[in-house]
Image (tube, grey):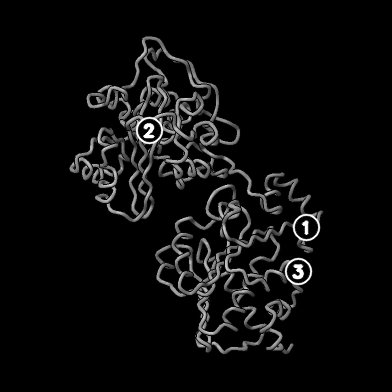
Amino acid sequence: MTVDTLALACDPCEILRAQGMQPDPWQQRFLLDESRYTLLCCSRGAGKSRCASAKALHYALFRPRSTVLVTSRTQRQSEELFRYILQGYAAVERPVPAIQQTQSLLELANGSRILALPGTEETIRAYQGVQLLLIDEAARVSDSLYRSVRPMLGVSRGAMIAISTPFGQRGWFWQAWSDAAAHWQRIRIPWNDCPRLTPEFIDAERRACGDAWIRQEYECSFESQTGLVFPEMVTRCAIDPVPQFVPATLGGIDFGYRNPFAAIWGHRDGDDVLWITGERYASEQSIHTHAAALCGPSLQGVLWYADPAAPESIDALRRAGFRIRKGNNAIAAGIAAVRARIETGRLKIDRSACPNLLAESQRYHYDPEQPGENPVDADNHALAALRYLVSRLDVDFVRHYLRQHPPHSDADAPAHADAVADAARSFPNDQEDLPESAQPQHATEPGPLPTTMPTSTPDHPTRFQQPPPFENDDHWHPL
C-alpha cells in the first residue's frame, strides 16, 4: 500500500494502520496526546509496546534532529521494542531515508536517531538533549536508572513515556502512579479495554493463575509483593514521630559502591526494644565520604556491626576512629532474629528518618520458584545492615536457630559450620566495648519465645512454624 506522507505526519496512528492494525480507541488517544510525562499502565496483551513504538518512530520522522532513547530492564527487551520500530519504519515505506540501521540504532537523514539501550546507568548516562525517552516494562526498571535518566530531559524539555504492567507496590513506577501531586499523565488500560482479550481467556487465566495474578497482569492493580521477607515491618514497626530523642549507641553497615552503601543506627531501651532512628543510603561514594558523613556528634558513641565480607572497609573505618565489629552473615538466622523482634514488638523504626529501610522491606522477597531459606539478593542493603546489628545483639537467638536448622546439603555444611563458630565466638567475648544499653540481657531462666520461628511451610521450606523446645539450652533467650 502507498502511504500518504501528509496523513502520516498528522496522525501517528497511520504507522499502525500501515502494518494492518486498526488502533484501539485508547491507542488513538495516546498517540495523539502531547503530554510531557506519561505513565501508561496496561494489561498484558493490550498492545502497549506496539503503540509506543509508533510514537517513537513518529517523533524521529517528523521532528528533525531528535534523539529518541528506548530502554528497558535488559538489552533484549529494548531490542524487541526497537524491532517493532523497524517494522513500522518499513511499513510506512521509509519516508525519511536511513543513514545507518542496526538492530539497536536507526539514524535518519533528517538528523534524528533512535537508540535501543539496556537499563543500566553506565550505558545510558552519557546521552543528553533527549527529545523522547521511552521506558518499556518500567515497573521492573530500577529506581537508580530512573533517577539517572531524568536529567537528560532538562535542557531539551523532552518527553518521557513509561509503559508497563504493574509489578507490585514498589519502585518508582508505582510511586509515580500513586502520587497524585506528581505531574504525570496517567493512562490505565485494563483487559476489557482491549477487544483482542476475551472474557473466556481471562477466566482460563484466573483458573490457572489465581485472582491476584489477574488483578496485577490484566486489571492494572498494583498488588502487594508476594513472598515478602518482612511483610509486617511497615505496619508493626514504623513510628512517626519517635517519642523522644535518645543518642544512638548501636548501628549496622552494609558496604557498597554501585550497590548502595547503607548504614542504620539507633539505641536499645530498658525493655529490650531496638529503636532505629536514622539511616545513610548512598551509591557511588568512597568509604572516606561515608566516614565523614557518619562521624557527626550524634553518632560519636555508636558501636557499629558491619558486613564481614568487606574487611578492608572495616579496617578503613577503624583507622578513621570508628568502633566497629564484624557482623554475623548467617542470612536465614539473621532474618529469623529480625522477624522475632518484629513479631514481639521489640523493633521500632522512625518512619521519616528511615525511608529506604522501610521501602526495602516492601520489596525484599523470596523467589517462589526457588524454595529455600535465602531470599532474592536484591533490595536488601539497609535490611542487611539491620540484620548485622540484630544478629549480634540477639546472638543467643542466632546460636539456637543454627542448632535447630542443620545444613540442607553437604555443599552447605562448611558455610553453616562457619556461621555456628562465628556465633559462638561473638558471645560473650564481644561485650567488653559495648555500651551498657547495648549489652545482651542474660536470663537465668528462658524468656518468652517469639510467636513464630522460621522453619518450614508447604510453599517455602524453613520459613514459619511454631518454635522448637529448648532442648537443654538453659541460657537461650530471644533478646
Local secondary structure at mark 3 = loop
Question: Residue 117: percent from the left, percent from the top?
Answer: 49, 69
Residue at the (48%, 63%) spot, across then down: 119
State which quarter of the image contains the C terminus.
top left
Question: At 34% from the left edge and 37% from the top edge, which residue is drawn?
Answer: 252
Residue type marked 2: His
Mark positioned earlier in the residue sequence (1 or 2)? 1
168 is higher (above) or lower (below) than 34:
above
Residue 264 position by quadrant: top left
The percent position of residue 256, horizontal first and vertical second, equals 34, 49
Badge 1 is on which residue? 192
**Marking on residue 24:** 3
Q: Position of residue 287 (x, y in %)?
A: 27, 49
Residue type of the residue flagged with mark 3: Asp
Q: Quadrant of the N terminus?
A: bottom right
State the SS at label 2.
Answer: helix
Q: Which mark is residue 286?
A: none
Of badges 1 and 2, nearer the viewer stands 1
Residue placed under numbered mark 2 in the picture: 416
Q: Position of residue 232 (x, y in %)?
A: 54, 34
Type of amino acid under label 1: Asn
Q: Residue at x 62, y 89 (%)?
A: 95
Decide: few, some or many residues near mark 2? Use Cα within 10 Å; few <14, some 14-19, many ≥20.
some
Residue 311 falls left or right of residue 38: left
Identify the mark nearer the N-term, 1 or 3: 3
- The residue lying at 63 percent from left, 57 percent from top is 165
Please state if 265 lies on the left or on the right of 432 as rendered: right
Q: Is residue 406 left or right of residue 304?
A: right
